[in-house]
Amino acid sequence: MPVSELLKSRFFPDNHYHLVFKSIDGILLFRQNSDYDIFLERFQQFTSFAVDTWAYCLLNNHAHFIVKIKPIDAIVNAINNIDFAKQTVAMKKLLAATDKVALVDEMLERQVNSFMVSFANYTKNKYRHHGGLFQKPFKRLEIDTGNWLKTAIIYVHLNSLKHKVFSNYSDYLHCSYFYFVRLCNTYCDAEKVLEFFGGLSQFISLHEAQARYYYEHGFPDSKLE
């Protein structure tokens, strides 16, 4: 089924997005604990020069990320610090452009697709998997208000409950919430996220309140999944 244009938002600096990576036909993305680590490391490897991760949750056959695109000056500086031989064609094109903001979407989409190819090749080599791994294109939805951003982060953190892969979302290892509340987050911009929520106590209480609501009323349907 073709992906709606609404779920293929263009990337712009300083904006937040909800990204979803889903496997084809429910194929397992993660079979061993090390696979989760490789997934996060590869995502950081291909995107961290231009993207700050605000939340994530990795499930059996799909993964959610909430990200913020860095300011254009930070992106340009980061690309300039990459060895010229390792800069991609899209990176060089952006650096040479007068309107650099207009080329952020093209460059980042290629980086994310390269991440997906990298992880797919990892699973093929490890598990002798043949054929495609990810549905394409990956889904991404721009988040344009503060309240929606809070809701999106909480939704991602509670996703293990929605799909019944773990009984207590706060103890699910493959979700950034686990590390936020233990103040040991490696992959997320924890300081900015907690500041956005008004501190750790408020961060936890808002998650607990939303979890109670979902227990009573059920999770909303999402076209992203």
Image: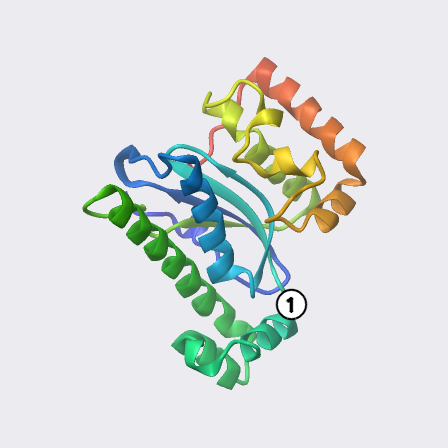
Q: Nearer the viewer, residue 103 or 122?
A: 122
Give the residue furthest to the top: 216
- In the rendered image, the vertical position of residue 90 relative to residue 119, given as above or below: below
Which residue in the structure is indicated by mark 1? 71
Query: To which quarter of the image does residue 163 belong?
Result: top left
Q: What residue is at 62 percent from the left and 48 percent from the top? A: 188
Q: What residue is at 43 percent from the left and 63 percent from the top? A: 111
Task: Evaluate whether residue 224 shows in this view.
Answer: no
Please rate how many residues cluster around mark 1, counting C-alpha atoms within 10 Å: few if below 14, some from 14 to 19, many from 20: some
User: In the shown orientation, is residue 180 left or right of residue 111?
Assistant: right
Query: To which quarter of the image does residue 173 belong?
Result: top right
Give how far across and how far down residue 181 sits, in percent.
70, 34
Quadrant where the N terminus sits is: top left
User: In the shown orientation, is residue 193 left or right of residue 8?
Assistant: right
Give how far across and how far down residue 55 sits, in percent.
59, 43
Amino acid on which the number 1 mark rests in the picture: Pro
Q: Nearer the viewer, residue 44 or 70?
A: 44
Give how far across and how far down residue 86 sits, in percent.
43, 76
Give how far across and how far down residue 96 sits, in percent.
50, 86
Query: How many callouts does the rendering have?
Result: 1
User: In the shown orientation, is residue 72 left or right of residue 63?
Assistant: right
- In the rendered image, the vertical position of residue 115 relative to residue 18, given as above or below: below
Task: Evaluate whether residue 21 shows in this view.
Answer: yes
Q: Nearer the viewer, residue 83 or 150?
A: 83
Q: What residue is at 47 percent from the left and 82 percent from the top? A: 84
Quadrant where the C terminus sits is: top left
